[in-house]
Image (cartoon, rainbow, N blue to C red):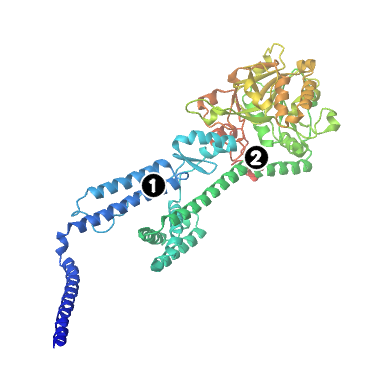
């Protein structure tokens, strides 16, 4: 009995323990159901810790966002302007602080969208480039100087001939295509955004097709506005998708680098084409030379010579070295037009075999009042013996650049074009043995006043009269020419308009001195002619009054118009000659008015443009 009663008493406590455990589990199940129900019914408003937790998460997100922006700024620092990025960071921080300061009851649901940064277009007025790198306005002067030193007068011509932005819709489409291509690779990797990826790809293909067929706004199809709006909408949707910014950043940098390389390539190509246009004869002038040559051999009726005037030392003899029919004609015509007496004027045009017959025919069929014109072939050894060269050499121009220490440097103040005598000039005493004095005119000058006063100049025993350029000192040229016995701070001089005393030239044997110096400096290549000429004529230059010549019309856009009108001679030294399309337009009119616009050959060869 004891055993049975003892067993029954042990089972009762065990049942009570299981019953208590079941009740506890049931209570927990009910509680787990009531808590979500309470949140759904708005009972969670009393749980302040939940709101604090949400605010904490939002602050952490915004903090991460700010630090991520800082990292992005540091990555893009070398390629984007710092002031723009600084503004972007400040705007982002201000937005963060304004969100935190706003009461939660006034905040909109969801995560705030960061403020959009509007980047101003990089125009020629506020940006320039050095080796493909972007630089803002504060560096424009310095970058222009580097460009001028690297590409020469092309940079001056480019800045002065820069056109205002046209075809804005084409440029807008290119910008949209740029951004869409940057976002597309990242969007395409997200499976949930397959629809957006397809729309983005379709819009990219449509814009690419349009741009492949259109280069101006006038070429665009009528529905282009709709295409642009669709592209803009798709880009806005792509921007709203959460992406890995590193991928977008890498793609943007790749496209930006490609654009930089392309811009640098076009810069070099443009500079090369500019130099090619400068150094080659225009098609119209080549046409004129060929036509005149053919006509010369067809018609010999004009072929008559006035040899008695060509060697008369009592007359006024002008010498022009040229292979350009139109240029030499303008020089002679402008001189004759402004001369009080043309009976005593004799012009000698020295040219080469290629242009000899064209020159001869042109000046035989055109008269210049009472003046006479003789055309000589400097390459004809049968006529002049030792006083010939294997080829004609024109006056040599040297572009000399100096660093500027001014607070606001200008590229015009750093660059000068110095033109000097060529090898051909040193044959003058032999070619004109009977003459004692000549005036040499370059073929890129225009005469605006009577030059007869030059024949009464007393040069005090000097060999040649020339315009001195005191902006270019001899000691400044030492970096180009090396150490030589130049007089310190003495001015350099230019060809263009030169009065030469041939008798004095022969007495001092100037030509022999020059050829000897050229042989000694043969290792200098291009600089040998400049050095030999400056050393040969040291202490033999008579400085003409500066009112005689105004130089720089072939490279300087900033010359005073009143000064141009008052100058006796205009010298188009530089690369932008007036007969080239690259010539400075506002200076061309002073040259063009001495062309014979009624001439048949000029019209047929389109020289009158």
Indicate left or right for 40 with 223 as reference.
left
Tell me if mark 2 has few (under 14), some (14-19) or many (20+) residues whose alpha carbon lies within 10 angstroms of its own.
few
Q: Is residue 372 visible?
A: no
Which mark sits nearer the N-terminus, 1 or 2?
1
Residue 493 in the image: x percent, y percent? 65, 22
Residue 470 in the image: x percent, y percent? 60, 20
Question: Which residue of the protein is positioned furthest toward the front in this rendering?
Answer: 2
Q: Quarter-wise, where is residue 87 in the image?
A: top left
Residue 51 got which mark? none
Quadrant of the image for the N terminus? bottom left
Q: Is residue 529 visible?
A: yes
Q: Quarter-wise, where is residue 414 in the image?
A: top right
Residue 285 in the image: x percent, y percent? 67, 41
Asked if 18 appears above or below 344 in the picture, the reply is below
Question: Disc 1 designates what residue?
Answer: 70
Q: Quarter-wise, where is residue 243 in the image?
A: bottom left
Quadrant of the image for the C terminus? top right
Indicate left or right for 43 with 313 as reference.
left
Q: Could you say which is closer to the camera, residue 248 or residue 67?
A: 67
Q: Are marks 1 and 2 in contact (CB under 8 Å)?
A: no
Asked if 603 appears above or below 183 in the picture, the reply is above
Q: Could you say which is closer to the camera, residue 438 or residue 399?
A: 399
Indicate left or right for 67 with 365 as reference.
left
Asked if 113 appears above or below 81 in the picture, the reply is below
Question: Disc 2 designates what residue?
Answer: 599
Q: Secondary structure at mark 1?
A: helix
């Amino acid at each position: 009995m004891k055993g049975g009663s003892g067993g029954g008493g042990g089972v009762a406590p065990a049942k009570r323990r299981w019953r208590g455990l079941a009740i506890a589990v049931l209570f927990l199940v009910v509680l787990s159901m009531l808590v979500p129900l309470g949140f759904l019914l708005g009972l969670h408003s009393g749980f302040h810790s939940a709101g604090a937790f949400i605010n904490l998460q939002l602050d952490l997100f915004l903090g991460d966002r700010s630090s991520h922006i800082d990292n992005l700024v540091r990555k893009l620092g070398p390629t984007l302007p710092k002031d723009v990025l600084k503004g972007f960071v400040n705007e982002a921080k201000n937005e963060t602080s304004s969100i935190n300061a706003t009461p939660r009851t006034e905040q909109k649901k969801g995560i705030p969208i960061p403020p959009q940064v509007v980047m101003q277009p990089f125009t020629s007025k506020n940006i320039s480039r050095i080796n493909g790198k972007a630089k803002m306005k504060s560096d424009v002067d310095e970058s222009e100087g580097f460009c001028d030193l690297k590409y020469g007068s092309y940079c001056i011509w480019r800045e002065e001939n820069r056109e205002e932005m046209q075809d804005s819709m084409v440029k807008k489409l290119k910008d949209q295509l740029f951004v869409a291509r940057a976002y597309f690779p990242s969007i395409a990797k997200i499976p949930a955004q397959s629809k957006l990826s397809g729309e983005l790809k379709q819009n990219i293909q449509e814009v690419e097709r349009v741009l492949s067929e259109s280069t101006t706004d006038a070429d665009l199809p009528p529905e282009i506005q709709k295409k642009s709006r669709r592209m803009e909408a798709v880009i806005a949707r792509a921007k709203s998708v959460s992406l890995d910014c590193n991928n977008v950043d890498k793609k943007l940098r790749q496209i930006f680098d490609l654009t930089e390389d392309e811009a640098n390539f076009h810069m070099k190509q443009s500079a090369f084409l500019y130099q090619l246009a400068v150094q080659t004869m225009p098609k119209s002038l080549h046409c004129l030379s060929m036509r005149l040559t053919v006509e010369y051999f067809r018609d010999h009726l004009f072929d008559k010579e006035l040899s008695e005037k060509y060697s008369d030392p009592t007359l006024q003899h002008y010498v022009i070295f040229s292979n350009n029919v139109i240029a030499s004609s303008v020089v002679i015509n402008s001189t004759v037009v402004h001369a009080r007496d043309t009976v005593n004027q004799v012009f000698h045009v020295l040219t080469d075999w290629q242009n000899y017959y064209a020159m001869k025919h042109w000046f035989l069929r055109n008269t210049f009042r009472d003046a006479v014109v003789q055309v000589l072939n400097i390459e004809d050894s049968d006529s002049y013996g030792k006083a010939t060269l294997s080829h004609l050499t024109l006056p040599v121009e040297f572009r000399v650049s100096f660093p500027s220490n001014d607070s606001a440097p200008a590229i015009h103040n750093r660059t000068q074009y110095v033109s000097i005598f060529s090898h051909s000039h040193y044959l003058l005493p032999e070619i004109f043995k009977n003459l004692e004095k000549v005036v040499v005119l370059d073929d890129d000058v225009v005469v605006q006043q009577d030059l007869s006063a030059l024949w009464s100049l007393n040069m005090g025993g000097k060999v040649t009269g020339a315009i001195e350029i005191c902006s270019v000192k001899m000691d400044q040229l030492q970096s180009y020419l090396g150490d030589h016995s130049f007089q310190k701070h003495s001015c350099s001089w230019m060809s263009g308009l030169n009065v030469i005393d041939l008798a004095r030239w022969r007495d001092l044997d100037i030509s022999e001195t020059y050829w000897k110096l050229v042989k000694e400096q043969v290792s200098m290549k291009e600089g040998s002619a400049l050095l030999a000429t400056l050393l040969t004529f040291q202490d033999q230059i008579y400085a003409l009054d500066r009112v005689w010549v105004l130089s720089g019309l072939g490279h300087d856009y900033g010359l005073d118009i009143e000064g141009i009108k008052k100058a006796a001679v205009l010298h188009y030294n530089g690369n932008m000659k007036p007969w080239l399309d690259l010539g400075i337009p506002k200076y061309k009119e002073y040259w063009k008015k001495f062309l014979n616009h009624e001439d048949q050959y000029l019209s047929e060869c389109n020289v009158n443009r």
